[in-house]
Image (cartoon, rainbow, N blue to C red):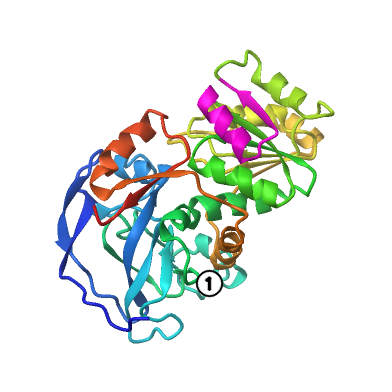
């Protein structure tokens, strides 16, 4: 294993200079600080969050100019003076959670994503749509030697996020989980994690192509919202006892599915919100939720322990990522397909082209 790398002074990157667009250009390669590492990013998954970052439509202060991306898999090529638990030449992943204080009550209880000083890749700090990216050493994902970096990249956000959401749902093996947005990048992984955790999957999305994809990944039932005349009734009927799913994982990027989930989840079930439609609200009748003892909760990205567990599912071959790879220079085309809802599975960009 090499212990030194020749690091260039410039690199190709996709940079958000104005809201709504990116520029493919050369920028300087940064030097890692004392507690940071520099990762030569080989591949980076493209997440719907990256589209929000480009469009600037979240109520969250965004760095400008900004290099987006937060699913980067690559090789550590430089480490800071205080870093001693990861070495040059090892494989590493850069996630949405780029760094945190490590000292607050949230960081000390495996809820690092709630840290008030959290650094967010591709939003508050530059992310992985560049050839070389920096992250705090304590938070980079440790990827086992020999792992296919192209295949593992989407696990670093999509995989970790849906795995954490399924844990938060408290659904038990044998119970039904409805995955809303099941045909997309997060949904395709959520189906597999749910199956690996012993759950039965009811997939909800639109179109025949997404239906076929969901079935191939292990969903037992598919409800197509584009052809359903009564989605709530159809989802309830899809479960054997007609009472609806025990849990709902909301990965949708529109508001309406969030309201529908409140109607079809079964009593004592849980609705877990993960998707973040810009400006959306979740509304539900208080009497109904109290009387039926339904839980509504949000689930953000996973912490370091969730990352280890999610990667373990992948390395054991229990989760595969249906993805298409394009060059980093083609990122703008991927954004447009995402905006039009035409992406099935996940897109990955190769930073070398």
Vertical order, 166 against 309 (above or below): above
Q: 102 or 2, which is in the foreground? A: 2
Which of the 4 quarters of the picture holds residue 249? top right
- Residue 47's x, y, as percent? 41, 46
User: Which residue is situated farthest in the top direction here?
Assistant: 229
Mark 1 element type = loop
- Left or right of 119 on screen, residue 30: left
Which image quadrant is residue 340 in? top left
> Is residue 52 on the magenta stretch?
no
Q: Is residue 208 magenta?
A: yes
At which x and y percent is residue 297? 64, 45
Q: How many marks?
A: 1
Give left or right: position of 211 versus 338: right
Q: On screen, 336 above or below 228?
A: below
- The quadrant holding residue 76 is bottom left
* Residue holding disc 1: 104
Say which residue appears at 37% left-offset and 54% top-offset: 44
What residue span does the magenta drawing correspond to? 206-225
Residue 240 image position (x, y, % from top left): 82, 29
Q: Residue at x 49, y 44 (%)?
A: 322
280 or 207: which is nearer to us? Answer: 207
Where 263 falls versus 349 (above or below)?
above
Most extreme residue toward the right is: 241
Q: Which of the pair 203/322 is nearer the observer?
A: 322
Residue 284 in sight here = no
The spot of residue 272 in percent (x, y) is: 63, 43
Q: Residues within 10 Å of mark 1 (few under 14, many from 20)?
A: some
Left or right relative to 61: residue 283: right
Would residue 315 be visible to someone looking at this image? Answer: yes
């Amino acid at each position: 294993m090499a212990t030194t790398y020749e690091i260039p002074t410039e690199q190709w990157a996709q940079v958000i200079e104005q809201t709504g667009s990116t520029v493919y250009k050369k920028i300087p390669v940064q030097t890692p600080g004392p507690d940071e590492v520099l990762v030569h990013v080989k591949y980076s998954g493209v997440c719907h969050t990256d589209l929000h970052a480009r469009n600037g439509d979240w109520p969250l202060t965004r760095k400008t100019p900004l290099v987006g991306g937060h699913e980067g898999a690559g090789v550590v090529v430089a480490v800071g003076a205080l870093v001693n638990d990861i070495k040059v030449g090892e494989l590493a992943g850069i996630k949405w959670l780029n760094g945190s204080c490590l000292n607050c009550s949230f960081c000390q209880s495996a809820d690092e994503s709630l840290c008030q000083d959290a650094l967010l890749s591709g939003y508050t700090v530059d992310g992985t749509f560049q050839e070389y990216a920096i992250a705090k050493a304590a938070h980079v994902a440790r990827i086992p030697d020999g792992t296919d970096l192209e295949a593992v990249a989407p696990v670093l956000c999509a995989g970790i996020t849906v795995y954490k959401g399924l844990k938060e749902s408290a659904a038990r093996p044998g119970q039904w989980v409805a995955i809303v947005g099941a045909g997309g990048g997060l949904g395709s992984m959520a189906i597999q994690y749910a199956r690996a955790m012993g759950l039965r999957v009811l997939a909800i999305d639109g179109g025949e192509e997404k239906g076929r994809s969901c079935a191939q990944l292990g969903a037992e039932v598919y409800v197509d919202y584009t052809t359903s005349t009564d989605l709530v009734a159809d989802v309830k009927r899809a479960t054997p006892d007609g009472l609806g799913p025990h849990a709902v994982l909301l990965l949708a990027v529109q508001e309406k599915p969030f309201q529908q989930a409140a109607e079809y989840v079964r009593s004592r079930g849980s609705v877990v919100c993960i998707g973040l439609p810009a400006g959306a609200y979740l509304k539900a009748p208080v009497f109904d939720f109290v009387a039926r003892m339904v839980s509504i909760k949000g689930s953000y990205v996973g912490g370091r322990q969730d990352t280890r567990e999610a990667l373990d599912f992948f390395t054991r071959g229990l989760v595969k990522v249906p993805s298409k790879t394009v060059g980093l220079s083609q990122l703008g085309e991927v954004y447009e397909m995402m905006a039009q809802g035409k992406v099935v599975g996940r897109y990955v960009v190769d930073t070398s082209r």
